[in-house]
């Protein structure tokens, strides 16, 4: 019965969220009206008092907590507050799930920056800003010496090492994990937030895709161009990309391929007469974590592989991937029928060493408490000692 109560709320805070997410009042009403007999009106939402039940429905969309709407202080609408106020257009038409993820990490970035300042830590950008007029190949070759970790044949562990290397250079990398049953999944793979934050979607079934996304976003960091995007390695062959996206794609390719680019360059043509150079492609893929499709796409872009043959290879690789996923699904179903408990669980994001060291120092300096440490690092209290000793 308490949901029928009316409470006073700060209308400017609701308007702030609508402005931030580029949602009209009518769109919001449509989103929260499902299952209601009585139609919600604009007056219901924009009056000084609002039904508690309506406010709860609104917060199911924005996940800010009811206290957010009751705070009498007006939120700051500025370029410093959000990338959504700094940029109007992104590499993909962001859905509400993507906007929530971006906003979540924007707020976390601001909070972590404040914590670092209180703990007298410098976690700001410490590398120069490059330009798209500079050669992405040359820059990639230069930075490999500093950023490229010891190669690990296990993609996930290589990704972890990359995140660690970036941390050494004051670049914060975060992962976000989406569960299989999430209603509206974010339609993005990654993004870069000024000055030094990269966020990645955990690609549990394709760590190579996540690795490429990370280095692509590192490219955005290097030229200091913020972006939120959904990446497709096939864009390596897209001649219509913007200069920025072309630069970041090329940088990612040359950074990851390293000395194995000589093998790719040695290929003159790839067709059925030479088995599409599969042997060479597999060697390079195995030793660089560039997917085979990414490498074939590079050959397509350089006109060493025809579009027709590329389509054949792509269809074959997609079918192999589909069959692999199908086999794994059947295996899980069989284990379930046999009463074998699945050992799988929701993946945990990789914590950047820079995040861990910042939180540790903030704790030692008395800026945050044990609860904050556990919440920020997503760890259980019984694991706290292993992070603070």
Image: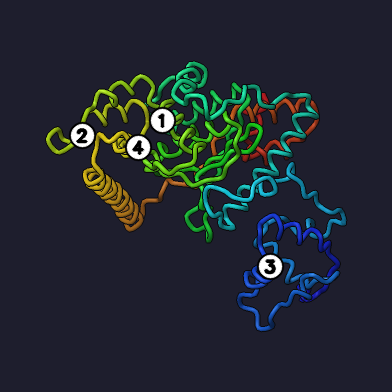
Q: Residues within 10 Å of mark 1 (few under 14, many from 20)?
A: many
Image quadrant in which the C terminus is located = top right
Classify mark 1: helix, strand or loop.
Answer: helix
CA gap, disc 1 and disc 3: 45 Å
Tag shown at residue 270: 2
Q: Nearer the viewer, mark 3 or mark 4?
A: 4
CA gap, disc 2 and disc 4: 14 Å
Tag shown at residue 57: 3
CA gap, disc 3 and disc 2: 56 Å
Tag shown at residue 112: none
**Mark positioned earlier in the residue sequence (4 or 1):** 1
**Mark positioned earlier in the residue sequence (3 or 4):** 3
* Residue with the mark numbered 1: 253
Q: Nearer the viewer, mark 1 or mark 3?
A: 1
Q: Residues within 10 Å of mark 3 (few under 14, many from 20)?
A: some
**Mark positioned earlier in the residue sequence (3 or 2):** 3
């Amino acid at each position: 019965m308490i949901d029928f109560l009316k409470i006073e709320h700060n209308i400017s805070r609701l308007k702030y969220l609508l402005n931030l997410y580029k949602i009209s009042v009518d769109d919001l009403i449509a989103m929260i009206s499902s299952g209601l007999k009585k139609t919600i009106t604009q007056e219901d939402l924009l009056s000084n008092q609002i039904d508690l039940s309506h406010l709860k429905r609104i917060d199911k969309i924005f996940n800010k907590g009811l206290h957010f709407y009751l705070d009498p202080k007006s939120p700051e609408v500025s370029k410093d507050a959000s990338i959504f106020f700094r940029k109007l257009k992104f590499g993909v038409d962001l859905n509400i799930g993507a906007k929530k993820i971006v906003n979540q990490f924007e707020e976390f970035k601001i909070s972590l920056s404040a914590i670092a300042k209180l703990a007298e830590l410098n976690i700001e950008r410490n590398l120069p800003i490059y330009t798209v007029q500079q050669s992405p190949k040359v820059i990639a070759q230069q930075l490999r010496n500093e950023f490229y970790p010891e190669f690990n044949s296990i993609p996930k562990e290589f990704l972890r090492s990359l995140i660690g290397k970036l941390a050494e250079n004051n670049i914060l990398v975060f992962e976000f994990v989406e569960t299989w049953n999430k209603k509206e999944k974010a339609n993005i793979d990654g993004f870069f937030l000024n000055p030094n934050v990269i966020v990645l979607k955990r690609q549990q079934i394709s760590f190579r895709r996540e690795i490429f996304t990370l280095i692509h976003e590192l490219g955005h960091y290097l030229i200091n161009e913020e972006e939120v995007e959904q990446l497709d390695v096939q864009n390596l062959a897209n001649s219509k990309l913007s200069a920025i996206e072309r630069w970041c794609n090329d940088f990612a390719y040359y950074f990851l391929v390293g000395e194995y680019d000589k093998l790719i360059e040695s290929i003159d043509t790839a067709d059925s007469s030479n088995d599409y150079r599969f042997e060479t492609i597999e060697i390079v893929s195995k030793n660089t974590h560039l997917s085979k499709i990414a490498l074939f796409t590079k050959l397509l872009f350089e006109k060493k592989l025809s579009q027709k043959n590329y389509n054949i290879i792509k269809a074959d690789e997609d079918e192999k991937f589909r069959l692999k996923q199908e086999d794994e699904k059947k295996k899980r179903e069989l284990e379930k029928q046999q009463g074998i408990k699945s050992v799988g669980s929701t993946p945990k994001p990789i914590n950047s060493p820079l995040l861990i060291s910042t939180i540790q120092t903030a704790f030692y300096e008395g800026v945050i408490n044990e609860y904050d440490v556990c919440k920020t690092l997503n760890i259980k209290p019984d694991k706290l000692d292993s992070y603070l000793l």
